[in-house]
Amino acid sequence: MPRLRALVKHFKIAKGKDKKRLAWKVVKEAARYSRIEPYWDFLKERFDVRDRDVKEALLFLEEEGELEIMRSRDGRKLYVSTLKDIRENPVKLDRWLKLT
């Protein structure tokens, strides 16, 4: 079983701080492949992970105040663009300041 699929399964059953840690692992692992198009089809074929599994982790982290999902002008959430940004800039300044 590929690593991303296992992380998604563990994230879904986790609770508390462990859930937040696993959500970050899911997002970072998914971000590794964010340049491949069509992205959601690639995840489904390669890892048997649905788009809503990754989106659920992103939404959870947004609710926890850990990250902000990019939005288009009409207010739609840009999940893949957010993953690309995480891939290129893994630690934002405000998050880095929280770590210190």
Image (cartoon, rainbow, N blue to C red):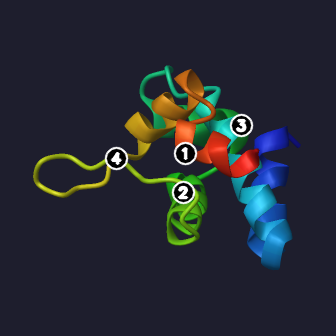
Which mark is in front, 4 or 3?
4
Residue under label 2, please give it: 58
**Would residue 15 be seen by someone viewing this image from the given angle?**
no
Residue under label 4, please give it: 70
In the image, 79 versus 67, the foreground residue is 67
**Would residue 42 be seen by someone viewing this image from the given angle?**
yes
Q: CA distance from mark 4 to mark 1?
A: 16 Å
Q: Please tell me how many numbered marks the rendered image carries.
A: 4
The picture places residue 33, in percent across and down from the top left corner, at 60, 26
Mark 1 residue crowding within 10 angstroms, few (<14) / some (14–19) / many (20+) = few
In the image, 92 versus 77, the foreground residue is 92
Which mark is in front, 1 or 2?
1
Asked if residue 48 is positioned above or below residue 93 in the image, the reply reads: below
- Asked where in the image residue 22 lies, by quadrant, the reply is bottom right
Could you tell which of marks 4 and 2 lies nearer the N-terminus? 2
- Asked where in the image residue 65 lies, by quadrant, the reply is bottom right
Asked if residue 86 is positioned above or below residue 73 in the image, the reply reads: above
Mark 4 residue crowding within 10 angstroms, few (<14) / some (14–19) / many (20+) = some
In the image, 32 versus 44, the foreground residue is 32
Q: CA distance from mark 4 to mark 3?
A: 19 Å
In the displayed structure, does residue 14 sit left or right of residue 37? Answer: right
x 58%, y 62%: residue: 61
Amino acid at dot 2: Leu
In the displayed structure, does residue 12 sit left or right of residue 96? Answer: right
The picture places residue 39, in percent across and down from the top left corner, at 47, 32
Could you tell which of marks 1 and 3 lies nearer the N-terminus? 3
Residue under label 3, please give it: 29
Could you tell which of marks 1 and 2 lies nearer the N-terminus? 2
